[in-house]
Amino acid sequence: MYKILEKEVLSDVNKLMIVEAPRIARKAQAGQFVIVRIDEKGERIPLTIADFDRSVGTITIIFQEVGKSTMKLGSLEAGDSLVDFVGPLGHPSEVEDFGTVVCIGGGVGIAPVYPIARALKEAGNTVLGIIGARSKDLLFWEDRMRQACDELVVCTDDGSYGRMALVTMPLKEILESRDDVTHVWAIGPAIMMKFCARTTEPFGTHTIVSLNSIMVDGTGMCGACRVAVGGQTRFVCVDGPEFDGHQVDWDLLMSRQRIYLDEEKRAVDDWDHEHACGCGHEQAEEKR
């Protein structure tokens, strides 16, 4: 069992948890992920590592409540335990002194881009950061990103905080105003990563994206995270989670993300019903 040491509510849908996992913390690197299972009957939830502390043996995860399993995870409190917390999995980010790089986090993607930005700065890079969300209440870790970046632009879609813009706008301005940017990391919703890659492509700037959100079992056995990269089939969990954004077949990826929408909606409806009647799943089924 893996104990939840701390929980922080970042917004109505975004939650942070610090989990006691010394063996994972000992080897974790930026860009890697863990598989979380709440209980013996729980779904496998792949989450990119948001932070780690080797000295105290903890892993920080940040997740958005978008389905039944993440809603159930979000209902846990400090002191509760997880039955499975497996990792670190996936290939770590390629970190070296590239020169000048841009790190972009969109929405909950701010969490996984933070340790990457920090590692790149520690390696000697000039790190330009961009973070964005739909509105101010969905932004988090601005302070951490400012520490990890030499410069930081904050955007919101609705203009409720920072600059009213999509993250692609300051990205394009940076690339137009300077010629020393060698790499871009963009992590967030698939549509955001797609258009970040489209923005950098005319400049020939190497662009790395993380496709964690399409994973299911995290071991390469289910095949659900199959993607086309450069015309070849890749599996996000074992070949990634990071890939060349210019080589990803974004239309195929986003169509695969919609495969289980009906099942996911039914699961959320079940969860809502369970809570509305104040009973467990089996009791809720009996009441229907």
Image (cartoon, helix red, strand yellow):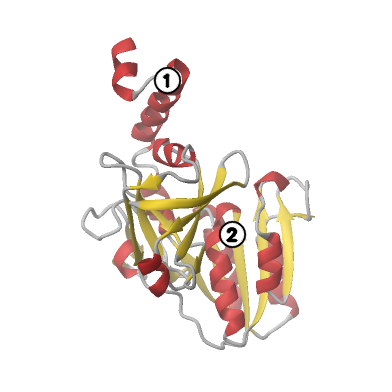
Horizontally, residue 25 falls left or right of residue 188, namely: left
Which residue is farthest left?
221
Q: Is residue 60 left or right of residue 161?
A: left
Q: Is residue 197 visible?
A: no
* Residue nearest the viewer, comparing 190 with 104: 104
Q: Residue at x 59, y 74 (%)?
A: 118
What's the residue at 55%, 70% (across, down)? 115
Label annotation for residue 110:
2
Q: Is residue 68 visible?
A: yes
Q: Earlier in the sequence, mark 1 or mark 2?
A: 2
Asked where in the image residue 122 lies, by quadrant, the reply is bottom right
In the rendered image, which residue does mark 1 sit on? 273
The answer for how far apart the CA atoms under marks 1 and 2 are is 32 Å
Q: Is disc 1 surrounded by few (<14), some (14 to 19) or many (20+) residues within 10 Å? A: some
| Front-most of residues 244 and 47 | 47
Q: What amino acid is at disc 2?
A: Ile
Position in image of residue 282 (x %, y %):
28, 21
Q: Is residue 185 above or below residue 44?
A: below
The answer to which quarter of the image holds residue 287 is top left
Q: Looking at the picture, tell me which residue is in the foreground, 282 or 95.
A: 282
Residue at 39% x, 39% y is 69
In the figure, 100 relative to 43: above or below?
Answer: below
Q: Can you say which quadrant of the picture contains the C terminus?
A: top left
Secondary element at tag 1: helix
Circles 1 and 2, Cβ within 8 Å, touching? The answer is no
Callout 1 amino acid: His
